[in-house]
Image: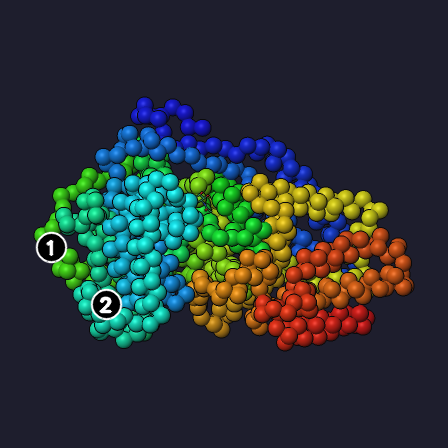
Amino acid sequence: MVSGHIHGNLPLFETRRAKGRALYRVFAASVFVCVVLIWVYRAIHIPGPGEDGRLGWIGLLLADLWFGLYWILTQALRWNRVYRNTFKDRLSQRHEEELPKVDIFVCTADPVIEPPVMVINTVLSVMAYDYPQEKLSVYLSDDGGSDLTFYALLEASRFAQHWIPFCKKFNVEPRSPAAYFASGGFGGNGDEEVAKVKKLYEDMENRITAAVKLGRISESICLEHKGFSQWDSFSSRNDHDTILQILIDGRDPNAKDIEGCAFPTLVYLAREKRPQHHHNFKAGAMNALIRVSSEISNGQIILNVDCDMYSNNSSSVRDALCFFMDEEKGNEIAFVQFPQKFDKVTKNDIYGSTLRVICEVEFSGLDGYGGPLYIGTGCFHRRDTLCGRKFTKGSRIEWRRESAKNTEESASELEARLKDLASCGYEDNTQWGKEMGLRYGCPVEDVITGLSIQCLGWKSVYYNPEREGFLGVAPTSLDQTLLQHKRWSEGDLQILLSRYSPAWYGLGRISPGLQMGYCTYCLWAPNSLATMFYSVVPSLYLLRGVSLFPQVSSPWFLPFAYVIIAMHFYSLVEFMWSGGTILGWWNEQRMWLYKRTSSYLFAFNDTISRLAGFSETTFIVTNKVSDPDVSQRYELEMMEFGTTFPMFTILATLAMLNLISLVWVVKKILTQVGIRFCEAMALQLLLCWVLVLVNWPLYRGLFLRKDKGKMPSSVTVKSAVLGLCVCTCSVLLY
Ligand SMILES: *[C@@H]1O[C@H](CO)[C@@H](O)[C@H](O)[C@H]1NC(C)=O
């Protein structure tokens, strides 16, 4: 708890330590003792040279060492959890007049997989924040350079004139029109007005959808706004001039909504692209926005959201400012990260896409050691820290008063002047991408940016409010989920190996707990090796009748049993505490296995081959639209296969291998070796059996389903043949 406050003012936020920490620490210590016992057992029982099982045993020793050490790292995420709470009423009382300007960056990259209607819903939701409108500016960066997206934004700027006053009048939540009208949570008061705005929204949506269907902007629309003329010189999305359009100019006294109230600034930007220039993905787009916005609104606070992530809580800006403006602690905070939550996730979350435990537990753990990672969306930054400012103790932030409005320069003059800031060559020989703005050279540039800010001495804050601040779109098929995790784990591993590694660059700059916390994510990819080993080798040795674990009657059985039971029981409790269901936990275990044996494995492999100089970084935008058929199966919580995605072959082969092993061994027990075999091989049998159980949806996809989402038969055949070969070889090779 924060106690005495130097300014005699009550603090704007409070920090509470998690309950039950002592209990958790005792529990963790007991697990640690058993982990050490397992290591000892592995080390002193290695079979002698020539004995069967020696290689498998040594492999398991290494895997157990890895899992144990990794488990120790994950303790940093649980040891010292803190939770935050804000006092927005105190903020309004003390600072309403001096609230800073806030610039909101929305990034989109492709009009096909990120439909313009979705993008403008995000834009509208953030334009309608409960905040002095003249202090808000919204910037859309369109790396797709699409006139369709521009058209949608133009429509949105008109609709906003009705939407914002409507939101204020009826205190609408959430402020994304699509989400609001879909929720149906209105009625009673103002029915007529709701119907009117709804009609306006639907008309607008229809116009945009029609244009998207047509695939281009019709002549008549082109004449509506001079901005379209900027596409005259456009040759392709990778080759065009800077397109900058101030759709609503907040400095203009005529920028008013229908009630005559002030209106947020709204800007469209497609930075210059040339084929021969590397554009640095989203980080490059963000940096262009930082520069352009500094000349237009120059807000001291920058919020950045992905285009699929609408605001579900109109007071998030005020929440964030409670941290930045707190008189005692605010000056050391560089960014406030909100969790990435998702809209329309099914109850048992079959792909584990809500990242429930990460959001509810782990990030609070990081917060206890100096702050969460910057995850690239739903995050409020201070502009100066994002631009590379170092932390100096005791310095105070000057919250700029509203400067006199400079309306001498017209919007179009301003646009012409600022285009250069978003040109390809602007960053040559500058610190942009290195010390300033988002850092380049890594697929998860956000994380590395957050880390380098923390390494300059700043803190960050994790704020997970009761009512979700932002809601995004979760992947709704297995291949999309696995691809996303491949990208994350690959990027995180690259960070570990880069100049900005939390392991060595972070040494002495951030707290050891935070270093460990970062490492748990950076080591996702190498985790694949130990998991792979565990899901193949014990089952194969089971087939040969070679035991790799202690017998039930041996005292060494106890630490194994304790670790297995305690860890799973704990993870179940943690998952339920985070708001999940039992079935959701079971699904999470499956995804744990799938991610480790496919995404992480591919990520590990690609990183190593890149280090060896074989391949280049590529960036894949996750698809945010799915066809109705797929969505329906998602609603029914059926796993979606349906393609010959390379990762599926690995998953299917592993599943087949374990199924064959299990069937083979059960037959052997029934016909030859009898029940005594079970006692000797209990843990290996259990492991194989659990692997088969967890893979149940995969067997259904391979053999039982008839719908389009089943596994393609080529994968079925391939995996069955491969599985059978490996099993037969392992029995025969003796
Ligand atoms: C979003 O906000 C609404 C209120 O507008 C709230 O009822 C809901 O719980 C929030 N979260 C989700 C996931 O819809």
Q: Are marks 1 and 2 in contact (CB under 8 Å)?
A: no
- Mark seen at residue 645: none
Residue on which disc 1 sits = 409
User: Where residue 622 appears, x then y in whole percent?
Assistant: 45, 63
User: Where residue 536 appears, x then y in whole percent?
Assistant: 70, 63
User: Where residue 224 appears, x then y in whole percent?
Assistant: 20, 65
Placement of 158 over or under 718, stated as above or below? above
Looking at marks 1 and 2 on the same chain, the residue that comes earlier in the sequence is marked by 2
Q: Residue 610 vs residue 672: left or right?
A: left
Placement of 149 over or under 18, stated as above or below? below
Quarter where residue 229 is shown: bottom left
Placement of 503 over or under 648, stated as above or below? above
Q: Quadrant of ligand 1?
A: top left
Give the residue type that dot 1 points to: Glu
Q: How is the image coloured?
A: rainbow
Q: Residue 699 vs residue 257: left or right?
A: right
- For label 2, the SS is helix
Residue on which disc 2 sits = 221
Q: Residues within 10 Å of mark 1 (few under 14, many from 20)?
A: few
Q: Residues within 10 Å of mark 2 (few under 14, many from 20)?
A: few
Which residue is at the front of the view, 154 or 301?
154
Q: Is residue 149 visible?
A: no
Name the residue rendered at 67%, 53% in the picture.
64
Quarter where residue 370 is shown: top left
